[in-house]
Every structure is written in C-alpha cells, then in structure tokens.
Image (cartoon, grey):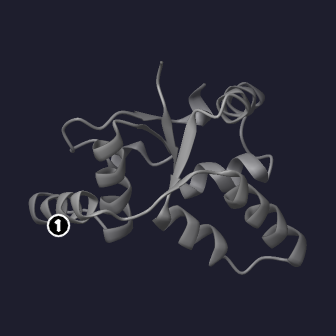
Amino acid sequence: MGTKYLIDTNAVIEFLGGHLPTSGSVWLQSIIDKDLYYLSVINQIELLGYNGSPAEMQTLQDFVNASDVLLLSDLIVQTTISLRKSHKIKLPDAIIAATALTYNLTIITRNTADFAKISGISCVNAHKK
C-alpha cells in the first residue's frame, strides 16, 4: 500500500503559493495525484480561516474540497490530551500529531522540529525533497 501522508497547513500554503523548490513541488504533486494524502480537521480550520484575497481563498477552498479531511474521533481527542500532558506542544500541533499517530501517517511539514520529540511520528520537509 505504501506511505500515506498528512499535509500540514504550512506545506499546503507553500505548495499552492509556489514557494517550494521544484523538486519538493514535484514530489508533493505526485502524492496529491496518487491520492496518498489527508488533511486534519485542524488544517482545514487553519486554511479556511486564513484572510486572503478572494482568489487565494478559492484556491484553498478547492484544495480542501478535493482532500479527505480526518475529523476528530474519541481516539484522536484522547491521544491529543496525552500528547499535551507529556510534551510542550501547541494544541493544533498536538491534534495533527494525534491524527498522524491514529492513522499511521507521515506528516509533511516545514516544522519537523515541532514533532521531533513525539515517539512514533515520522515527518518529511518538502523543502528538502
């Protein structure tokens, strides 16, 4: 089946805005084309809560609409609580980490250090692809 990914908000914005190196953009596009990715509900909230131009907002809305968004389940909530208690981690990052752990997903993010202390989390930085 292969690796599946959870794309963090910063990676989506950098990809859609053309701010990734060519190799990272091609790599991420292949993941999107093969439907090997998900968004967390927190990514949906962050992306659609952005205050951009109408064109930017439409691009973000189209991306979210084309994505499978993983909602909060009881297991994700309990894992988030556990992560918040055991690590100094912001709530959005804890939800992303808990979602990745629950579904065994690799996180695509520029902020790999945010997740480095969490056992079982795998991260990839598209800027380094």
x and y percent of residue 1 in the render? 48, 18
Label 1: element kind: helix
The quadrant where residue 37 appears: top right
Compared with 111, 82 (above or below) is below
Compared with 90, 76 (above or below) is above
The quadrant where residue 9 appears: bottom right
Total labels drawn: 1
x and y percent of residue 42 in the render? 47, 66
* Amino acid type of the residue that numbered disc 1 sits on in the rendered structure: Ile
For image coordinates 64% across by 51% down, the residue present is 67
Q: Residue furthest left?
A: 86
For image coordinates 29% across by 38% down, the residue present is 121
Q: Residues within 10 Å of mark 1 (few under 14, many from 20)?
A: some
Q: Residue furthest right?
A: 55
Compared with 52, 82 (above or below) is above
**Residue on which disc 1 sits:** 81
Quadrant including the C terminus: top right
Compared with 11, 125 (above or below) is above
Observer-nearest residue: 56 or 4? 4
For image coordinates 31% across by 70% down, the residue present is 91
Instruction: Left or right? Give the position of 107 relative to 65.
Output: left
